[in-house]
Image: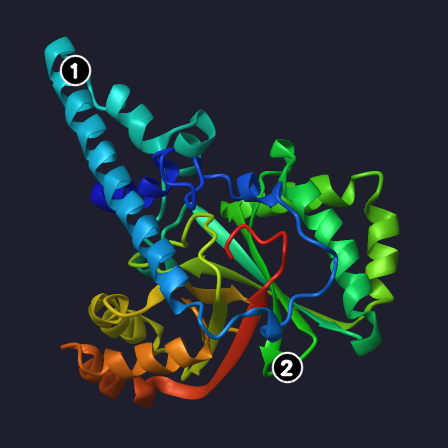
């Protein structure tokens, strides 16, 4: 459990010399740079973007390795100080691992329930699907593009915007948003704070006139795949959604834990979540590619990596339905 929390907290420490990596855990940090209100489109992705994407990807991954080494060194020094001072556990090392008092409080008394076996219990994520009226897409982009970053930038709201995307292949005119909260207490607090904002009624009324439907599910990260911190690699995203046969989630996690190492050698993952409230027995995987051709190449390369074929063989029988969406990041999305 301790090692898992330490690895997860790598997302909290990123060296300043890597411009594509956010300096802190807060997803709101990347929302200051906003583009035009025009809705994102697949046509924005250039066919020759693979080289630039690979360079940014390499820089980002090197930053993660550097952050991991820094975190390990901090922990080593903290242990040494604790041994010298004779302090009990919960001193300097605890502060390094858990960060803020709020974070330490959230990690107390975590029950070993089924979901805790699968998930990192500190975070709850929501995935929100907005089906936007075709003639209201740009108006929606302008409205949400000004409201979401504002809400994510208010510390008291206790919410991070992971990212916002528009679907270009599959469910066109669908916008997908992923938010991060500190457990369910943070989710309730965020809803309360945002809906109590003086400008919320006007925003909500206008939003309802732009969409035909809204769907929300509450999810948790798989313990083996923490959600990426903010980054700007470019390219496009693929959201793969799987509906599993009831009772197979733990087996799915076991096989994917082994197969992910093989997949990550050739593909860039963003996150993996399983739904706890909403569309039950659903798993979402989010990947990032330079363009559609690179997606094809990378997926084909996966089959040459040892372990991937076995993962597919073991997981396919667990699936009822599966769906793929190609997403383009919005200008305000922290992960893009």
Q: Which mark is residue 171?
A: 2
Q: CA distance from mark 1 to mark 2?
A: 55 Å
Question: Who's the residue at 71% across and 65% down the image?
Answer: 39
Q: Position of residue 327 (x, y in %)?
A: 55, 71
- Spot the residue most to the front: 48
Q: Is residue 116 above or below residue 4?
A: below
Q: Which residue is mark 1?
A: 81
Q: Is residue 47 above or below residue 265?
A: below
Question: Who's the residue at 24% across and 70% down the image?
Answer: 254
Q: In front: 297, or 227?
A: 297
- Could one spot residue 114 in this view of the protein? no
Label 2 residue SS:
loop
Q: In front: 82, or 141?
A: 141
Describe residue 272's horizontal placement relative to residue 202 as left or right: left
- Could one spot residue 107 in this view of the protein? yes
Of the image marks 1 and 2, the number of the one nearer the N terminus? 1
Describe residue 272's horizontal placement relative to residue 148 as left or right: left
Q: Position of residue 24 (x, y in %)?
A: 44, 35
Q: Crowding at label 2, few (<14), some or many (≥20) Cα neighbours within 10 Å?
A: few
Q: Position of residue 27 (x, y in %)?
A: 52, 44
Describe residue 45's horizontal placement relative to residue 154 as left or right: left
Q: Position of residue 129 (x, y in %)?
A: 64, 69
Residue 64 occupies quadrant: top left
């Amino acid at each position: 459990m301790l090692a898992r929390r330490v690895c997860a907290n790598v997302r909290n420490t990123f060296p300043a010399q890597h411009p594509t990596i956010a300096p802190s855990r807060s997803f709101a940090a990347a929302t200051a740079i906003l583009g035009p209100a025009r809705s994102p489109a697949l046509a924005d992705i250039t066919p020759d973007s693979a080289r630039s994407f690979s360079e940014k990807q390499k820089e980002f991954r090197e930053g993660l390795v550097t952050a991991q080494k820094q975190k390990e060194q901090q922990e080593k020094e903290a242990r040494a100080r604790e041994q010298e001072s004779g302090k009990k556990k919960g001193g300097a090392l605890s502060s390094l691992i858990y960060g803020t008092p709020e974070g330490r409080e959230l990690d107390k008394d975590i029950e070993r329930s089924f979901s805790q076996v699968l998930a990192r219990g500190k975070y709850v994520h929501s995935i929100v699907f907005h089906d936007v009226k075709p003639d209201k897409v740009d108006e929606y982009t302008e409205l949400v593009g000004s409201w979401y970053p504002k809400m994510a930038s208010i510390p008291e709201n206790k919410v991070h915007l992971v990212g916002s995307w528009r679907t270009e292949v599959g469910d066109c005119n669908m916008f997908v948003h992923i938010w991060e909260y500190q457990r369910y207490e943070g989710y309730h607090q965020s809803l309360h704070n945002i809906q109590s904002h003086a400008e919320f009624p006007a925003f909500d009324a206008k939003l309802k006139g732009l969409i035909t439907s809204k769907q929300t599910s509450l999810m948790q990260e798989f313990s083996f795949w923490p959600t990426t911190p903010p980054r700007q690699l470019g390219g496009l995203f693929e959201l793969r959604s799987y509906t599993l046969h009831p009772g197979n989630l733990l087996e799915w996690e076991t096989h994917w834990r082994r197969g992910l190492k093989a997949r990550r050698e050739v593909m860039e993952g963003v996150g993996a979540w399983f739904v706890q409230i909403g569309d039950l027995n659903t798993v979402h995987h989010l990947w990032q590619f330079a363009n559609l051709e690179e997606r094809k190449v990378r997926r084909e390369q996966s089959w040459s990596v040892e372990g991937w074929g076995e993962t597919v063989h073991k997981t396919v029988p667990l699936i009822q339905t599966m769906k793929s969406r190609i997403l383009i990041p919005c200008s305000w999305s922290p992960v893009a």
